Amino acid sequence: MKNDIIIENLNFNYDGTPVLKDVNLTYDVGDFLSIIGPNGGGKSTLLKLMIGLLSPSSGSILVFGKKPQEISQRISYVPQDTHVNKNFPISVRDVVLMGRLSKSKKLFGHSAKDQKIVEQMLEKVDMLPFANNSISALSGGQRQRVFIARALASEAEILFLDEPTASIDTSGQIAMFKLLKSLNKTVGIVIVSHDINVALNYATKIAHVDKTLYMHDAPIPQNTTLFDAQRTSKQHVCPVEIICATRCNHIHKELS
Amino acid sequence: MIDILQFEFMQNAILSSLLVSIICGIIGTLIVINRMVFIAGGLAHGSYGGVGLALYLGIAPMLGATLFALTLSFVIALLAYKNSSRIDAIIGALWAFGMAFGIILSDLTPGYNVDLMSYLFGAILSVSSEDLMHIGIVLTLVCLFVCFYYQQLVAMSFDMEFAKLRGVPTRALYFILVALIALCVVVTIRAVGLILVIALLSIPPYIAEKFTHSIAGMMAFSTLLSALFSLSGIFLSYMYDLSSGATIIAVATTVFFMQLLSEKVFKY
């Protein structure tokens, strides 16, 4: 076990109110970690602490053995769709090129290598045909794919995603998680989601955050075949069936 | 018609309006995409405090306005970058403070201040070669900044958090950007005055955004629109003996409303 992320006794206060209390977590890049929990429970805050956009009030977060701010080139981030400026006049290609920015980035233009990586990443998320489209012309799901390509373009080792499926229907969510699952073969995935059913079904580790954090292993057996069947069948994607499929006999450790 | 071009004041007016158009096209685009129009308004009005202070101290008004606006820009950048939730109220206070401070100081200055109206409403027909040099310096600074940091500025404007994670020095860029807005506002005051400057910074980029697919394109198109508005404003104000600043803004707002209207008409 390498433990690429180690969080110990983490506390975070916002304006004097505790948001996160005594959080402990270990994570390995091979894992698909879903962070679930109620609204206002601190999910997104925990994610922002892990990528170094916020600093802990006390306790420590080490990513690859260092503070997140020091290894920001090795991690990348997919923001919530809601905080993105949708009317911004910019092409899909130029958005993904932002992933190639770095501290040492030269000032003018992008190299042929940058352009090539951008096209590869757009290909990976099935968005290459849209490369020259304007970002404002895309649907919520397509835009989210572009942001995943942007995060991939920085060749990071862990991808952090904040509610990537918030504005996507169930069918789109399954497609998104399938994509993330396939990406997980090469990069670590840490995702904040309130779509518990889908999130649980693809994760290998689940963190339930409500001020403090409870770790769970993924419920076994996962029923990804049913999810795939739901997506490939031409009939409607049935949320009810999905809830039934993911129902498990999971019991809280402290309750049992 | 050509004969009016022989006057030196007219040549200066045209040249300065073209240079100011480039500055406004570039900086105005950055203001609009970063939703900083209110910050620009605060800086424009607040800088009047600098004009009053300069009159009181007996130094050049434009120098006073420049230094005062730069100081204000630092305070505003400090507060806005931290994303203070009441930033609009704070800017409103600085906005009013600058104006009041300027008026009181000019009241306290002995003698009759003939020039005050020109700072409020602009006097592009009386631009001196010294003014032209100031405009040229600001234009050079703006162009250098945007050429060197174009990608970083676009990334920061689009998604500040992502840019920060990729190692873009967002804090430094933000402070420089607000300082350049201050300089831009001060030189544009010569053309249209501090009350109307906000129109020249927001209308061209607002229209340009709808017809372009990149920030560079938006800057170029805004520049063209600014130049069009300024030149036709100067021409109309000369023809009909109207205030140049207000005429320029009248042309800009007319096009703005026509664009809004045509958008509604073609949509339905």
Image: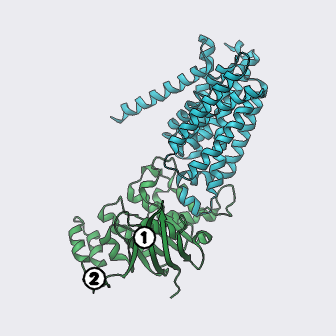
Residue A250's label in the rendered image is 2
Q: Amino acid at mark 1?
A: Ile
| Up-down relation of residue A20 to residue B200 (above or below) | below
Q: Is residue B163 left or right of residue B50?
A: left
Q: Colour of chain A?
A: green
Residue B240's label in the rendered image is none
Picture quarter with the C terminus of chain A:
bottom left
Residue A191's label in the rendered image is 1
Q: Nearer the viewer, residue A217 or B125?
A: A217
Which label's residue is closer to the chain start, 1 or 2?
1
| Up-down relation of residue A57 to residue B6 (above or below) | below
| Up-down relation of residue B237 to residue A18 (above or below) | above
Q: Nearer the viewer, residue A144 or B188?
A: B188
Give the chain letter for cyan: B
The residue under the point 63% across, 55% down is: B171
Label 1 SS: strand
| Up-down relation of residue A49 to residue B87 (above or below) | below
Q: Across the whole image, how many numbered discs are drawn on residues?
A: 2
User: In the rendered structure, the residue with mark 1 lies on which chain?
Assistant: A
User: In the rendered structure, the residue with mark 2 lies on which chain?
Assistant: A
**Which quadrant of the view contains residue B221?**
top right
Q: Nearer the viewer, residue A242 or B47?
A: B47
Q: Are marks 1 and 2 in contact (CB under 8 Å)?
A: no
The residue under the point 50% across, 35% down is: B207
